[in-house]
Image: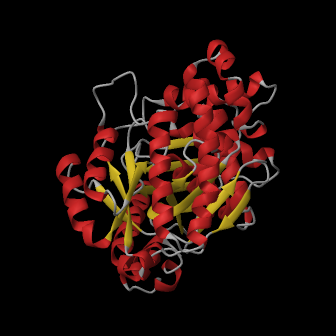
Amino acid sequence: MKTLEMKEALLNKTLDESFSVVYNHSQYEEQYSRFIAVIEAFEGLFGSEREVSLFSAPGRSEVGGNHTDHNHGKVLAAGISLDAIAVASKNSEGIVRIKSAGYNMDVVDCSDLELKEEEKGKSRSLVRGIVSRFKQLGYNIGGFDATTASKVLSGSGLSSSAAFEVLVCTMLNHLYNDGKISPVEIAQISQYAENVYFDKPCGLLDQMACSVGGFVTIDFEDPSNPVINKVAFDFSSCGHSLCIVDTKGSHSDLTDEYAAVRKEMEAVARYFGKSVLREIDKKSVIENAKVLSEKISERAVIRALHFFGENEKVEKQVAALNAKDFEAFKSLIIESGYSSYMYNQNVYTCKAPKNQPLSMALAISHQILAGKGAWRVHGGGFAGTIQAFVPDELLETYKSTMNSIFGNDSCYVLSIRPFGGVKLV
C-alpha cells in the first residue's frame, strides 16, 4: 500500500488481523496512532506516493541469567510489549536512510560498508554493520528509506539498541530477502554489528530475546547454534504482574563497566587455558581462588562465582515454572538479585558511589514486597531498571510508590509478546 492508503486502513481499523499477531486488542488504538505518526513523518521526508510496509521489533526483559550470555551461559528471557516500529520503502539508489524520532537521520551507502572508526558508538554504525554482515553472509542488500519510533526506553536495560538492530534486520530481511532469514541468524547479525561496528562487547542475550520473542530459555554453550526452548507459562495465572521500574539512570557512559564484567570473567577462564567460563567449573575456581585473586583480582573471582550460580539458577527457575511452583520461582528471582548485587556488583558504579538509584529501588521493593513478591536488578545494571514480580493486590501501591520516587510513569506493567521482529503489513 502507498502511505495514504496505509493511513486510511489504520484509521478505518481494517488491519486488526495483522496487528493481532503482536498487540492485544486493547492496544490497537494506541498502536494505530503511533504508526500514523510514523507514516506522516515518512511522508514529510520521502513523499506520499511510496509503497510502504510496517514493521515492529520488541524490547526484552531478562528474567534469569544476569551477565551470563557473554560467557556462553544460560538465560531466561522474554520479548515484551514495548516495541520499536518502522515504516519503510525500498529505493533504487543503494542508500539506506533511517530517521528515528528524536534523532538525526542515519545514512549508509551500500557500496561503502567498511568499518569507520568515527562512527563507533553511533546508531549509523549499527546500520552499516548490519548491511555489511548481510552481504558477507551472501544475502541480498539494497537501499531503503524508513522512519522509526520506539517505546523501548533508551538506556533502561530493556534493550533499545537490540530492538533497533532487530528492526533494521527485519526490514532488510523482508524488503530484499523474502523474510527467509531465521530469527536466530537475525540475532547473530545484530550482535555482530554491535560488537564489531558499534564497538560494544555485548553477548547475544538481548538480540536473541528481541528477535525470537515469547518467553524463552537460551543456552549459549555453542553461540553459533544456541539451544532455544519456549516456556509455556502464564504469569497472570499466578496473580502477579511483571513490572519494570525505570530509575532514570542512563547507560550511555557505562560501556567500560559492562566490558569489565566480561573481561574479568574471561580472564579467569584464560588462567585455565579456556576462553569463557562455560568451559571450566566452579570447583576449579574455588580451589584456585588465592592465585586467581593475586594474578587477576578478587572481583574477577567473585564475578566468576556469580556466573556459575546464575547458570544453576536458570535451570531451577525453569523447573519451578514447569512445575507451576511460583513461590519457588520468586525465591530464585530474589537469590539472583542478591548474587548480582554482592557477587557481580552491577547495581551501582564505583565511579559515583553516592548515586545509587537502583539500590534504592531494590530497597524500597524489599520493603513493599518482602514475603509476597520478588525483585532484582534488570539487564546490564549499574543504572537503568529493576524488575519486580508484584502480587496484583499490591500493584497499585507498588506503582504509585515507585512513580512518586522516580517520576511519573517510571513503573511499567508489561505483557509477554509471542513474536520477535515482524513485518505487520
- Asked whether 192 or 222 is in front, the reply is 222
Residue drawn at x 37%, y 66% as measured from the top left = 34
Q: Quadrant of residue 125?
A: top right
| Left or right placement of residue 261 versus residue 385 in this view | right
How far across and how far down the image is residue 146, in percent? 51, 56
Residue drawn at x 40%, y 46% as measured from the top left = 156
Q: In this view of the protein, can residue 158 be seen by the observer?
A: no
Using the image, determine if residue 299 lies above or below residue 386.
above
Residue drawn at x 40%, y 62% as measured from the top left = 38
- Asked whether 308 or 190 is in front, the reply is 308
| Left or right placement of residue 173 versus residue 335 in this view | right
How far across and how far down the image is residue 406, in percent? 23, 47
Q: Identify the coloring.
A: secondary structure
- Asked whether 103 or 93 is in front, the reply is 103
Using the image, determine if residue 105 lies above or below residue 171.
above
Residue drawn at x 67%, y 56% as measured from the top left = 218
How far across and how far down the image is residue 363, in percent? 29, 45
| Left or right placement of residue 46 versus residue 316 in this view | left
- Asked whether 153 or 55 is in front, the reply is 153
Using the image, determine if residue 221 lies above or below residue 91.
above
How far across and how far down the image is residue 89, in percent? 57, 62
Q: In this view of the protein, can residue 168 be seen by the observer?
A: yes
* Position of the C terminus by quadrant: bottom right
Instruction: Spot the residue most to the left.
Output: 404
